[in-house]
Image (cartoon, rainbow, N blue to C red):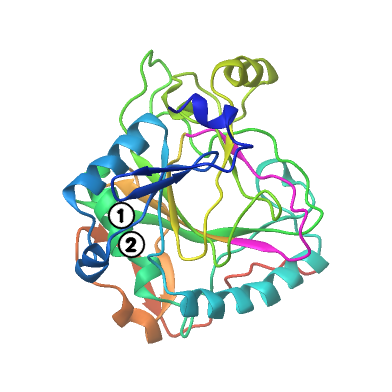
Amino acid sequence: MRYLIPLLSSLNVRCALSNRTLLIGYPMQIKPSAEECTDEALSPAHLAQAVKALQTDGYVVIEDIVSHDHLDLIRERMDADAQLLYDAKQWSGAGGLPGHLMLGAPPFAPFVFRDIVANPFAVQVSQAMLGDRFFNGLYSGNSNCPGSQTQPLHRDVDHLWSSLTVAHPAASLVVNIAPQDTSEENGSIELWPGSHLDPTFGSVISAEAEAARRATSPPIRGNTRKGSVLIRDMRLWHRGMPNHADQTRHMIAMVHNIGWLQRGRVLKFSTDCEAVFPEGPLDHNAAFTDEPIDHVGLRTG
């Protein structure tokens, strides 16, 4: 099925698989039932589907599990913050190409919400993949501006060991939440199915490796509807694509790491949102402060 999806991506075809709806050319998508939404947990069958998708393809989408009102509030603020970085031409991301910005949601009230920083469905999937204790190593994101360029194909992280002949199980998962629909028009991420299982080392993918993989397992686009969560293995090959729309496409990013990985910096949030972070298997790796937090990182001078 994985190899057929890219070949049929131009067809507007829907396949009903039990309670799951899969749009051909899109990532594997799971739509929680009303009961699952009430319980804030995937059923055993849906959880098994999510784990299988991450293990095999390297990504999965859980649909309609984030409040649109929360996303609307965050998007309005991210629009304003992105304009500051855009005006300063402060490009970032793979290749540092024009139109791509590193920008996350503000880490202070009223912009921090449980269904984003500790989404119960994302936590459940990460726990199934990483074990009973894992931590969040990032609260950031990216903004893809109109007229952006195609990034080089890359991995966010390498395998943990350089001498492997078979890829190890997942150690880090990216949890992406977009505050708007994403599509080819506004620069949805390009994903390469199964590439996280390629044991070769190196963050930038060579043209030769790209051509060889394209011949057998071409990329798809990580199109998602507003309110959905895209979870992917950090080793998955991917890249930012041009935004042909007239509005900036934002993406919030968190990284769930297996508990024994070395930690970097503690994530700073304001004390006015401390109550949003629940106890549970996810270690938020957070410190709360009354001091101002510069989440934009605008360079001056």
- Identify the main secondary structure in magenta: loop
Q: Is residue 132 left or right of residue 253?
A: left
User: Can residue 241 be seen from the camera position used here?
Assistant: yes
Q: Residue at x 54, y 80 (%)?
A: 73
**Image quarter of the C terminus:** bottom right
Q: Position of residue 66 (x, y in %)?
A: 41, 69
**Above or below: residue 34 compared with residue 193:** below
Residue beneath disc 1:
135
Query: Which disc, if any, is residue 285?
Result: 2
Residue 232: quadrant of the picture: top left
Determine the image quadrant of residue 179.
bottom right
Q: Are marks 1 and 2 in contact (CB under 8 Å)?
A: yes
Question: Considering depth in this image, is 169 or 49 the residue closer to the camera?
Answer: 49
What span is in magenta? 236-250
Q: CA distance from mark 1 to mark 2?
A: 6 Å
Q: Residue at x 71, y 53 (%)?
A: 185
Tell me where residue 137 appears, x and y as whole percent: 40, 54
**Residue in view at x 49 percent, y 24 percent:** 3
Query: Is 124 part of what is drawn in magenta?
Result: no
Q: Is residue 132 visible?
A: no
From the viewer's perspective, is 139 left or right of 160? right
Residue 23, given in percent of the width and then of the height, sits at 49, 45
Q: Amino acid at mark 2?
A: Asn
